[in-house]
Image (spheres, coloured by chain):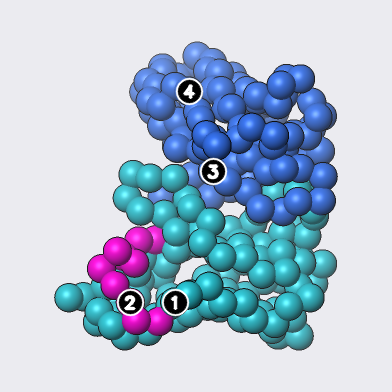
Chain colours: A blue, B cyan
């Protein structure tokens, strides 16, 4: 079974621009969570989607948003990019509902200049 | 919200010796505690997890223990090998999939030959 995939793998953007990242979960998984990883703050939870609904959201500004499609693929968007948004963005998929185990994708490395 | 503290930040052990990484959590509602291994430039990989109704779980050379009363859990790696060198993250969650994982800051495990 194929693992979690993310596109693109690397991205360079300029301050003030917006960016959209994509995540395809493991086949059959219906929950997708997004995390931001930085050297200073570590791994931080952004939000979680299940059956196209956001069930939970971490402590990030409204510039960070996401959505999930009927095939469980998910996208996250960051608007008005700031230098501090430079990070590795990881998505993780889970079967969903009451299943806990989360499996991570390879991440998208975003650099904001 | 949940807060997870992880110690030590760096751990160096001789090959063949044991390594122990400790985490504490603050939210008594947390009921799921996974451990992830992240090698340089790679995605976090789920290596073992434990739920609050279990005190200990083993998988070959890896074991995790949980003390709910003290709100701490530990990762034990026996007979360490060079391929165990990586950053290890503990995490906690209180929701079945809906709640995001709250991560510790990570432990850089170095296996000395």
B87 and A97: which one is in front? A97
Residue B98 to residue A109: above or below: below
The Cα–Cα distance between marks 1 and 2, rounded to whole angstroms, is 8 Å
Within the magenta stretch, is there residue A101?
Answer: no
Residue B86 part of the magenta-drawn span? yes
Q: In this view, does B47 lie above or below A79?
A: below
Q: Which chain carries label 4?
A: A
Q: For the magenta stretch, what is the residue range?
A: B78-87
On whether disc 1 and disc 2 are found on a single subunit, the reply is: yes
Residue B81 x/y as whole percent: 29, 72
- Is A102 drawn above or below residue A24 in the view shown? below
Quick one: label 1 or label 2, which is nearer the N terminus? 1
- Quick check: marks 1 and 2 in contact, CB under 8 Å? yes
Q: In which quarter of the image is residue B78?
A: bottom left
Numbered tag placed on residue B80 in the rendering = 2
Foreground tag (1 vs 4): 1
């Amino acid at each position: 079974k194929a693992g979690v995939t993310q596109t693109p793998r690397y991205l360079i953007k300029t301050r003030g621009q917006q960016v959209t990242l994509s995540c395809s979960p493991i086949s059959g998984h219906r929950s997708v969570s997004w995390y931001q990883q930085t050297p200073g703050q570590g791994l931080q939870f952004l939000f979680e989607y299940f059956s196209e609904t956001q069930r939970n959201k971490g402590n990030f500004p409204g510039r960070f948003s996401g959505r999930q499609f009927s095939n469980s693929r998910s996208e996250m968007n960051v608007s008005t990019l700031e230098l501090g948004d430079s990070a590795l963005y990881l998505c993780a998929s889970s079967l969903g509902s009451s299943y806990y185990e989360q499996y991570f994708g390879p991440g998208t490395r975003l650099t904001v200049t | 919200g949940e807060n997870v503290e992880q110690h030590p930040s760096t751990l160096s052990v001789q090959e063949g010796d044991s390594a122990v990484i400790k985490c504490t959590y603050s939210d008594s509602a947390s009921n799921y505690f996974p451990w992830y291994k992240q090698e340089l430039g790679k995605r976090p990989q789920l290596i073992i997890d434990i739920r609050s109704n279990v005190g200990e779980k083993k998988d070959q050379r890896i074991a995790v223990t949980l003390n709910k009363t003290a709100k701490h859990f530990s990762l034990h790696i026996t007979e360490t090998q060079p391929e165990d060198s990586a950053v290890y993250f503990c995490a906690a969650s209180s929701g079945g999939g809906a709640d995001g994982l709250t991560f510790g800051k990570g432990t850089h495990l170095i296996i000395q030959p």
